[in-house]
Image (cartoon, rainbow, N blue to C red):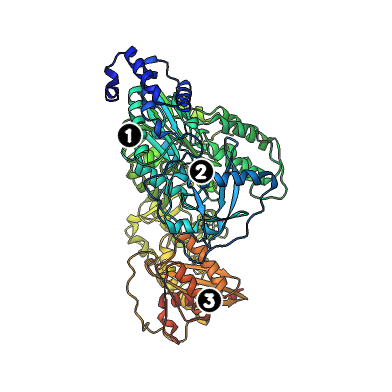
Amino acid sequence: MLLSLQNWELIPLKRLEVLSNEKNKYLNRDQKMLIEKIISRTELQNPEEKDKFFISLEKNISAFSRHDYDLGKCKIMAPPILTTSEVPIQVKPYRTPAKYREELKFRLNKMLEAGVIEESLTPWANNLVLVAKGDGQLRPCVDFRPLNRITVTDPYPLPKMEEMIHKAAGKSWYSSLDLSSGFWQIPLDKESSYKCGIITEWGLYEMKRLPFGLKNAPSIFQRTMNKVLKGIKNVSLYIDDILVHTNSVEEHIEILEQVFSRLKENGLKLKGEKCKFFMRKCIYLGHEISRKGYKPAQSNCETIKRFPSPKNAKEVKRFIGMTSFFRKFIPNFANTAAPLNQLTRGRENFKWTEIENKAFETLKRELLNSLCLRAPNYDQPFHLFCDASSVAYAGALMQSDNGTDLHSIGYWSRMLNEVESKLPATHNELAAIYYAITYFKPIIYGGKLIIYTDHRPLTFLFSKASTNVKLNRWLLALQEIEPNIVYLEGSANKVADALSRVPVPWTVAVPPPNEDIPYLMNFSAEKLNKEILEREIQNDPILKIVYNYIKNGWSEEISEDLRPYFLIRDRLAIKSNLIIKRPEEQIIIPEILRIKILELIHHAHFGVVRSKAKARKIIWWPKINQDIENFIGGCIICQKFRPNEPQTASENSWPEAKLPLERVHIDLAGPFCGTNFLLLVDAYSRYPFGYQLKSTTSTSIIKKLKEIFSMFGPPKCLVSDNGPQFVSHEFECFMENYGIKHMKSPPYHPQSNGLCERFVRTFKSGILKIIDKG
């Protein structure tokens, strides 16, 4: 009879019901009630489909736990917990409130019976706490913060939430599966179990199963479940959230049976009360997913809806943080939130006006009425609509199923910083496209992309090379996407009209007349501007003639003063009343301003080579290299701090580094005006780092290095001199804990630490020059 059930699709419905009733006698009362409860919560309407699912549940009833502590035991053991120190962590036990003492004791006994913990003699002691679960029950958890601080991070990646949602959205049927205390079903090895010791009022225990709160627990669980469900299609897995999604009931039952089978094979059990099968829509990773697409879960929207008007900057940040998670659903989020972001930049003089309140209410309304986004169809072209205003960039990615009507894939926006807000329109319009494509690149890469803009100059910019370095960099980066760019007038741009429903409307900036003039230098903007250049060109006796020759044509007979310009006449042009040398777009500087320019170039007192390189990017005049050499050669401050003795080659030649952070050189500089600096140089990239120190003790240096390593990672090898800070026991232990090979230069010969010694000299010279200059 059991074998005949495998071919249930060939059996008439009435006969199927008889078989089901006969098989029911093998189920106990609780199992029958569980199956009936699961069936009653489905959205299946067809009785035949219900019967098929009923049979499937009967066959796989052993995949469901009978009660909270009927836990499975996975056949895949968790990887060992590695720590940077083997010194046991020991803490004093928390005092349990009298109200929860009996509850905690009861839970501990249940965990003992279920094999989750066992009594132990472990010297590792972590505190036990009770945490309320979503269903109101209390769950015993361990405060692993001390252990987590010394645990080596498991690099196994968690899936991208957005990719999981895109994979699941747009299907007809959904089933959400929940493991019964999933983490507790994965066994630990003996050594790891020993480290997960628990101290309570009733004695010491150790975790035999993977505990909640452990630093690497999510990665371990994700790795395990990926192995268990490997190869099953139409299953999305994010840690313990298992979602089956299909377009047909038959396929859905088939995949569910595969999942049930894998779980049983690997010793895992589901919690039937929390599983939901055959839903038309479901909540997954904070989103409501359905055939139409996906949108924010209503529970999250209600939380934001009830959020009171902020009373201080901290509450504003909290609100922005809550809404930012769903910013892809709100067109031009950054523009709308701009007034609120302004309040977070200073805690003093907090003023909540009508403008901020309007932005606050608008964001809540937009989220409550948010559009349902579609999952991308990678066989169809993508349509990207971009715009830039005076305060924000924004983009909308869309697709069409029938070639006419567009539906939304996602929205993106961000505020402009202070520098970007001052850029010309063409820069910002192209920047909006560049950053929008960068954001959507994981979706659109490899597909056909059509970009729509209401800024006509961009259509020409994509078809020919620009003379602006930054624009060229963006254009080159966009070439691999191979986009088609289409100009739409504001009246014809329906998507722009849809996006304009935000309270702070998008504006199309009018390009200023000098938008294509490259800026001289950021630091010189206050001292030298375009108006001064225009005036002095007309006052310069030589450049005035050159200016007229460029406009009206060159004469065959010219004076000796004009010869340098005559030789490059084909490369000279007039742009916005300035004389430009192509193709570098260098501005020709009038003679009266050249000393001022040289002072600006040499402001930081760098050498001749760097100063020439800095100058040739943006300016030119005849014999500019010679003028730079003469100017720097006559600099009193540079002469004062020039080394007295020539630097000798290092006696210790280091091998060439093949990778970043393969070898890092470290040294101290100072004190300068009572301040010391920690300097590091990467041997591969020659990239220097400089950090201010409060003191030069080993403790202070270690603290700073931990900050640096948290950002860039630790190097394989660290080279230092024999300073007491670097040869102390504390520093050597730090190196050993981080697995860093520590090499020291020979005593009395610090030059062997060549890279950092050179940087120290450069750094010291620069600091002293600045101090001397006042």
Q: Residue at x 36, y 55 (%)?
A: 582
The reply to whether residue 456 is visible in this rendering is no
Q: Hey, which quadrant is residue 544 in on the image? A: bottom left
In depth, the one of 74 and 299 nearer the eye is: 74
Q: Which mark is residue 634?
A: none
Question: Vertical placement of 466 versus 172: above or below?
Answer: below
Going from N to C along the chain, the mark reached first, 1 or 3, is 1
Residue 712, image x, y percentages: 45, 61
Q: Which mark is residue 512?
A: 2
Q: Amino acid at mark 3?
A: Ala
In front: label 2 or label 3: 3
For the residue carrying disc 2, how many other residues have a C-alpha within 10 Å: few (<14), some (14-19), or many (20+)? Answer: few
Question: Vertical placement of 82 versus 654: above or below?
Answer: above
Residue 391, image x, y percentages: 56, 42
For the residue carrying disc 1, how many other residues have a C-alpha within 10 Å: few (<14), some (14-19), or many (20+)? Answer: few
Q: Amino acid at mark 2?
A: Pro
Q: Amino acid at mark 1?
A: Lys
The residue beneath circle 3 is 669
Asked which secondary structure carries label 2, the reply is: loop
C-alpha gap between disc 1 and disc 3: 59 Å
For the residue carrying disc 3, how many other residues have a C-alpha within 10 Å: few (<14), some (14-19), or many (20+)? Answer: many
In depth, the one of 376 and 197 nearer the eye is: 197
C-alpha gap between disc 2 and disc 1: 55 Å
In front: label 1 or label 3: 1
Q: Which mark is residue 233?
A: 1
Q: Residue at x 46, y 49 (%)?
A: 209
Q: Residue at x 60, y 49 (%)?
A: 129
C-alpha gap between disc 2 and disc 3: 47 Å
The reply to whether residue 52 is visible in this rendering is yes
Question: Which part of the image, by quadrant, shows the C terminus?
Answer: bottom right
Instruction: Check contact, mark 2 vs mark 1: CB within 8 A.
Output: no
